[in-house]
Image (cartoon, helix red, strand yellow):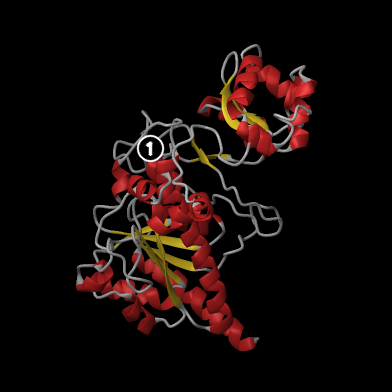
Amino acid sequence: MTAEDRPGPLAGVRVLDLSGMLAGPYATMLLSDMGADVVKVEPPHGDRTRKVGPWRDDADRAKALGGYFQSVNRGKQSIVLDLKQADDVAVFLDLVKVADVVVENYSAGVMERLGLSYETLRQQNPRLVYGCLRGFGDPRSGSSPYEDWPAFDIVAQAMSGFAGITGELGGSPLKAGPGIGDIFPGALLALGVTAAVRHAERTGEGQFLDVAMYDAMLALTERIVYQHSYTGEVPAPMGNGHPLLAPFDILRTADGWLAVAAPSDNHWRILTETMGRPELGTDPRFATNAARLENIEEVRAMLNAWLATQTTRQVVALLGGKVPIGPVNTAADIFADPHVHRREMLVEIEEPGSSRPVTIAGVPIKFSRTPARIRRRGPKLGEQSTTGVLASWTAASAAAQQGEDNA
């Protein structure tokens, strides 16, 4: 059996994905990559990201799959249900009976107003894992004064303190380039769902779990919590430096930029020897991480002076594999890097209507026995039928139950 034929570690797990935009779909994308059968339940107008590009010039005129949607909805199926209509609600409840997981990222109270709360769905399927992701969490897990506030990635980055420590030294707060205020909460939701599915398999007991974007981003920004607790400091933007490690920076070379991290005293000595300044490795002002932090401006000045005489390629040739360094890559650099090809981190998939495949980011979690992989392109709106999905899931559920009965 080839890797292409092997099921992923979540094979057999059936997921109803009611989420839209980035955070929820990213979570269910991870589940799909690991083998879960994810069915995206979309309203008649579809996920809002279906209308967001970029688009291929030669793609189909309907523009069924833009880059945004393709990237985080690969591997899923799509059905259309209007959950404000009784007939469609009945179909959805039939699917819930044979599902393992429901994921949604509506505002708090939306599912309750639709008559589809966790408590209602649990009556249909006691084994159901119900995962939700909201800006400020669900009141079941702890009421927030902001629970009715809408939130996007940038809001989570701001309120969690992440943006407050990101930016130029002494400068204004700055958000991260990628949508980490969505992506990191989504990754945590996928982890939580996987853990809850494991519990349900052992006990037959489903449960409700929720991830707040604010909470997730605060967990990601954990350094400011202990730093403030231990020292009373209010951390501020530090540019590319670090308050506890030196050198730990992104610095300019003769022709680009380079990350340099040598807080280890041994790495520092290797760096100074390569610079032709071995005496700096034992100089009391710079010999230890603590000393370098006290004299950080001098450390940066010396590194800047040396790097200004070297191209990025030259520094990488001198220090690669010896000291933690790395070039600041552009997208073009990444596409040319053998690492991402050997690690299958650039994956080509079909683009409907286009004569050429498109490339999306691959799966970073590697399994030796149950490969995680991108199994198909993203679905067109309503590409699968509700009757087909229900029949398939009902048969799979019956087979699984028969297996349990025979065990």
Numbered disc total:
1
Q: Position of residue 169 (x, y in %)?
A: 46, 31
Image quadrant where one finds the C terminus? bottom right
- Camera-side residue of 277 and 180: 277
Under mark 1, the amino acid is Pro
Q: On the image, which quarter does residue 134 sit in? A: bottom left
The residue under label 1 is 173
- Camera-side residue of 285 and 88: 285
Q: Is residue 272 left or right of residue 169?
A: right
Q: Position of residue 84 (x, y in %)?
A: 20, 67
Q: Position of residue 30 (x, y in %)?
A: 51, 55
Residue 30 appears in the picture as rendered: yes
Residue found at x 24% / y 56%: 44
Residue 378 appears in the picture as rendered: no
Q: What is the residue that sits farthest to the top in this orientation?
A: 309
Q: Is residue 314 left or right of residue 113?
A: right
- Camera-side residue of 53 and 160: 160
- Camera-side residue of 127 and 148: 148
Q: On the image, which quarter does residue 198 sit in? A: bottom right
Q: Is residue 321 above or below residue 179?
A: above
Image quadrant where one finds the N terminus? bottom right
Residue found at x 25% / y 57%: 149
Residue found at x 37% / y 42%: 65
Task: Specify few, some or many for label 1: CA neighbours under 10 Å numbering under 14, 14-19, or 20 or more.
Answer: some
Q: Considering the numbered disc 1 on the image, is that residue within a helix, a strand or a loop? A: loop
Q: Is residue 51 above or below residue 16?
A: above
Q: Position of residue 27 (x, y in %)?
A: 46, 57
Residue found at x 65% / y 52%: 366
